[in-house]
Amino acid sequence: MQLFFEQLLNGIAMGSIYALVTLGLALVYGILRILHVAHAGVYTVGAYIGLFFFQLTGSLIIAALGSMVFCAMLGVAIERFVYYPLLKYPPYVPLIGSIAVMLAIEELCRLIAGPHILTFAAKLPFPEIQLGGITISSTLMAVYCITAGVLAFLWYITSFTELGLAMRATSQDIPIADAMGINSHLIVSITFVLGSAIAAIAGILVGIYYNQVYPTMGAVPAYKTLALIVVGGLGSVPGAVIAAMLLGVAETLLIGYANIPLPRDALAFIAMIGVLMWRSEGLLGSR
Amino acid sequence: MSQALLDIQELSKYFGGLKALDQVGFNVMGGEILGLIGPNGAGKTVCFNLISGVYRPTAGKIYFNGQRMDGTSPHQVAHKGVGRTFQIVKPFGTLSVVENVLVAKGITKYNRFSRIWSTWKSKAEINEALEMLERVGLKDLADRQAGLLPLGNLRRLEIARALLVGHKLLLLDESFSGLRHEEIVQLEELIRSIRETGITVLLIEHNMRVAMGLCDRLVVLDHGSKIAEGRPQEIQQNEKVIEAYLGRKEASDAA
């Protein structure tokens, strides 16, 4: 039983990290209707830049802030120079552009940092908790708290602020939002800033969680998050978060605990195929 | 009526070889209701899209309040006090009716970084939005999801949004089409009351009876060119206008 709870805690942490990466993808799909595959590349860069600043300064806070700022700029650059000029074409054109950016980022990381796995040996400044014989490590606590903080922050922005209202309006109809005086292009850029900064946090957390950073660390998340936004309902941010949490728990429990003989990464796609067959709008999607 | 609020000079828009609008010029005086009419494909909506900044003109100038306005982007045009509705009603479907109005109310904040973080859920904000809804007769439906409203109510919702943006000039694109007779009468009254508050109205209209009854002056477009301009009575008698709507005499004889 103890093993079960430990696995459950790991599953929730896994799900939290999936949620952090998937958020950006869901936000971008919601506002531009683009599959932002390169988002996983931003997440890889986030891990590398975080590690770089950490080795330089020894401070995780500076590492996180530096990485978030860098990734936000990278995200906006991808939006301005790749997606925006391609928006007038059918959706598969920006998708191809996105895949190209993803590959380019991976190769750049390999060229600059080398192909080896780098270690990210940092101790996150969160307390360790004992709960009835189960230990929740400080890394797990960090993943929980940071994810909860990010989700609360996003929820506050979208539900209460004028910016959130403008984001919701822009994601529904760009010409109308413009006619209401919203600078929709600026709103799109802000969306990329938010999503990319969150991806940077996710990159650092994963780097520390597994104690490794490597050029292709974004490859599996790149397609898994695609499956997740389909399962959650394309464009639905809450749906994507729920799908990510469920997947993290399901992966750890079904394959890690119940020993179902399946490759771990297959689960997301089985779920996606199931959703496409029986509930094509996803968990929380409309239409 | 004093000086021209909107001054359009030699305005042209070509799409490839198609002259959607060709050297059209007219004035909209402050405080008047001007109707833009013409058969399908005459270039009326293109003209609206040029004024509201959706398209850049191929040639020509637009002055608003004496300032050059062509080539500015749509959200900047909105910030100058020009509000518009769309021919095909487009509410923010998943937002509630009152939230739709609040999006437009945000116009006072979108340009200021410090105010973009402020809440739209405060009592004062919501009360002001409800007042606007009362004015267009939608207060009872404030909490409904906008996408589920019938067409007549959606048209009113669009006008409410456009009014908050367009405190100087209101562009209405076929707001009457598809409405029942009672709804048309109510909407005519609403537009007259809007004009009473000093807002200038430029509207595109297909329904001739409405256009004749409501507008102070009419501008008639056909195949992208202006063919007539004047009071409704003058336009009714104008031969070019009758030709444009009913077809040329020779053509109908030959057929």
Image: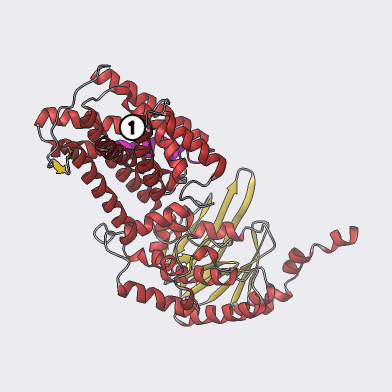
Q: Is residue B60 left or right of residue A192?
A: right
| Closer to us: A138 or B207 | A138
Q: Is residue A16 left or right of residue A140?
A: right
**Residue extending farthest front:** A1
User: How crowded is the residue under tag 1: few (<14 C-alpha within 10 Å), some, or many (20+)?
Assistant: some
Q: How is the image coloured?
A: secondary structure
Residue A253 lies, in percent from the top left, at: 35, 35
Chain that bears disc 1: A
Q: Is residue B252 above or below residue A171?
A: below
At x 61%, y 81%, the residue is: B185
At x 53%, y 49%, the residue is: B58
Residue A112 lies, in percent from the top left, at: 25, 20
Q: Quadrant of residue A7?
A: top left
Residue B2 at least partly seen: no
Residue A202 lies, in percent from the top left, at: 27, 37
Residue B140 at least partly seen: yes
Q: Is residue B92 magenta?
A: no
| Closer to us: B43 or A142 | A142
At x 33%, y 72%, the residue is: B125
Residue B127 lies, in percent from the top left, at: 36, 76
Q: Is residue A85 magenta?
A: yes
* Residue bounds of the magenta highlight: A72-91
| Closer to us: A163 or B111 | A163
Q: Amino acid at mark 1?
A: Tyr
Q: Is residue B110 above or below residue A260?
A: below
**Residue extending farthest right:** B254
Check disc 1 and report its element: helix, strand or loop: helix
Residue bearing mark 1: A257
**Residue extending farthest left:** A58
Q: Is residue A15 above or below residue B98?
A: above
| Prevailing secondary structure class for the magenta stretch in the rendered image | helix
At x 45%, y 73%, the residue is: B142
